[in-house]
């Protein structure tokens, strides 16, 4: 990322170009051997810093210009070659400023989904459980045999979430920018992330880190959903690193040379079979697993991790008669309206608590203050 400013610095030191504009711009970009400027990671946070430092603007690779132009109040110029930069700073080339209507893009693309909850036949109880999870920000695990629709349901969860706020969209885009996941000519992320890593993922890839620190999957799922399919197939060491982020909603990575924090406020949705063969408690199929085998399979997930998953939902197969029905079930839009209404109630409830917007974020003290259990409810819990 520093190739371009180093090259310009050398050219300026050799008095081969004018230096009048250098103090007004931040320059970032990688250089190839033929002078082409290649894209970088983290263009958005660099542009935000440029505005905070009251710089006139930023000059960076053309592929990153749309991303940097999300930031209002600075001039953004995308360039393709080192010669373009020198000519521009010398006043010999007019570059076109990049413009990005962030609010228009945000409102236009915030709720466009290609999938819908109405695609799923039956499973009304599971849909209701996921609606409750989305409304309260609760982590959930779906336990059921193969083919019961666990993955299909989980993938549709973002369609019933409240839309990202502009602040959340910027925050999410910054993380993906730093990780180099935005892609060329991409701008603001307008939909909640849905990350579904493979069960062979390493702990570094999940939480982040490395020689050159990068956000991991749990930070890429910030403000969205982290879906862990076939949870017991993940290495236990990988699952255990989830405990701190689930509790604190940040990832703290400490190494000999650095210490860094990444945001990690995500909703965990996991799925698993009830046993290795998948047929334990199946209404039509017989389980062939020995009791000890089933227990060893379940023991792959530690108690402390399960304690951080609020909803444990049993998923049963859908009967053929229900699958063949033509009745259309509730759409994501209808369910989302109820979720948004529930979030608004919580927003009012937690108005005096900074940074708290969902039931799942309440501390023990807040539970005592906000969720007082009446005598009738206590009697019900005791029975």
Image (tube, rainbow, N blue to C red):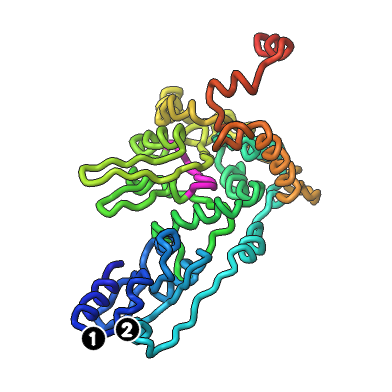
Disc count in the image? 2
Helix, strand or loop under label 1: loop
Q: Quadrant of residue 281?
A: top right
Q: Which residue is painted at 31% across and 82% down in the image?
A: 82
Name the residue nearer the viewer: 368 or 329.
Answer: 368
- 231 inside magenta stretch: yes
Q: Which residue is mark 2?
A: 86
Instruction: Please tell me whether mark 1 or mark 2 is closer to you in this view.
Output: 1
Q: CA distance from mark 1 to mark 2?
A: 9 Å
In this rendering, position of residue 338 left or right of residue 203: right
Q: Quadrant of the N terminus?
A: bottom left
In this rendering, position of residue 201 left or right of residue 161: left
Mark closest to the chain's N terminus, 1 or 2: 1
Q: Quadrant of residue 297?
A: top left
The reply to whether callout 1 and callout 2 are in contact (CB within 8 Å) is: yes
Q: Could you say where residue 3 lies in the image, as x and y percent from the top left?
A: 26, 71
**Residue 239 visible somewhere in the drawing:** yes
Instruction: Judge whether 338 appears above or below 166 on screen.
Output: above
Q: Which residue is mark 1?
A: 16
Give the residue at the far bottom of this rendering: 92
What range of the chain is rendered magenta? 221-232
């Amino acid at each position: 990322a520093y190739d371009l400013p180093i090259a310009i610095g050398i050219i300026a030191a050799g008095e081969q170009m004018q230096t009048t504009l250098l103090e007004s711009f931040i320059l970032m970009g990688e250089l190839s051997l033929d002078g082409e400027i290649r894209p970088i990671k983290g263009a958005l946070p660099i542009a935000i810093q440029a505005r905070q430092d009251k710089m006139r603007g930023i000059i960076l690779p053309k592929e990153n210009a749309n991303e940097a132009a999300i930031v209002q109040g600075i001039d953004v110029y995308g360039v393709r070659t080192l010669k373009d930069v020198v000519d521009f700073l010398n006043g010999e080339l007019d570059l076109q400023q990049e413009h990005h209507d962030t609010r228009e893009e945000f409102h236009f693309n915030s709720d466009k989904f290609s999938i819908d909850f109405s695609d799923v036949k039956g499973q009304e109880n599971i849909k209701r459980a996921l609606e409750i999870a989305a409304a309260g920000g609760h982590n959930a695990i779906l336990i059921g045999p193969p083919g019961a629709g666990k993955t299909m349901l989980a993938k549709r969860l973002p369609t019933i979430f409240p839309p990202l706020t502009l602040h959340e969209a910027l925050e999410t885009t910054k993380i993906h920018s730093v990780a180099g996941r935005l892609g060329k000519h991409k701008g603001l992320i307008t939909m909640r992330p849905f990350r579904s890593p493979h069960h062979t993922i390493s702990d570094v890839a999940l939480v982040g880190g490395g020689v050159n620190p990068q956000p991991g999957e749990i930070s890429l799922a910030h403000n969205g959903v982290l879906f862990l399919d076939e949870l017991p197939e993940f290495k236990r060491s990988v699952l255990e690193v989830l405990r701190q982020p689930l509790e604190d909603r940040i990832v703290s990575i400490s190494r000999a040379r650095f210490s860094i924090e990444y945001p990690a406020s995500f909703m965990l949705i996991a799925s698993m079979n009830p046993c290795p063969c998948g047929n334990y408690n199946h209404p039509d199929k017989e389980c062939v697993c020995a009791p000890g085998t089933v227990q060893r399979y379940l023991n792959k997930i530690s108690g402390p991790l399960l304690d951080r998953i609020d909803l444990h939902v049993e998923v049963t197969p859908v009967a053929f008669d229900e699958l063949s029905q033509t009745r259309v079930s509730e759409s994501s839009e209808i369910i989302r309206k109820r979720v948004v209404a529930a979030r608004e109630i919580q927003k009012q409830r937690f108005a005096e608590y900074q940074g708290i917007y969902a039931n799942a974020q309440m501390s023990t003290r807040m539970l005592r203050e906000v969720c007082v259990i009446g005598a009738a409810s206590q009697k019900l819990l005791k029975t």
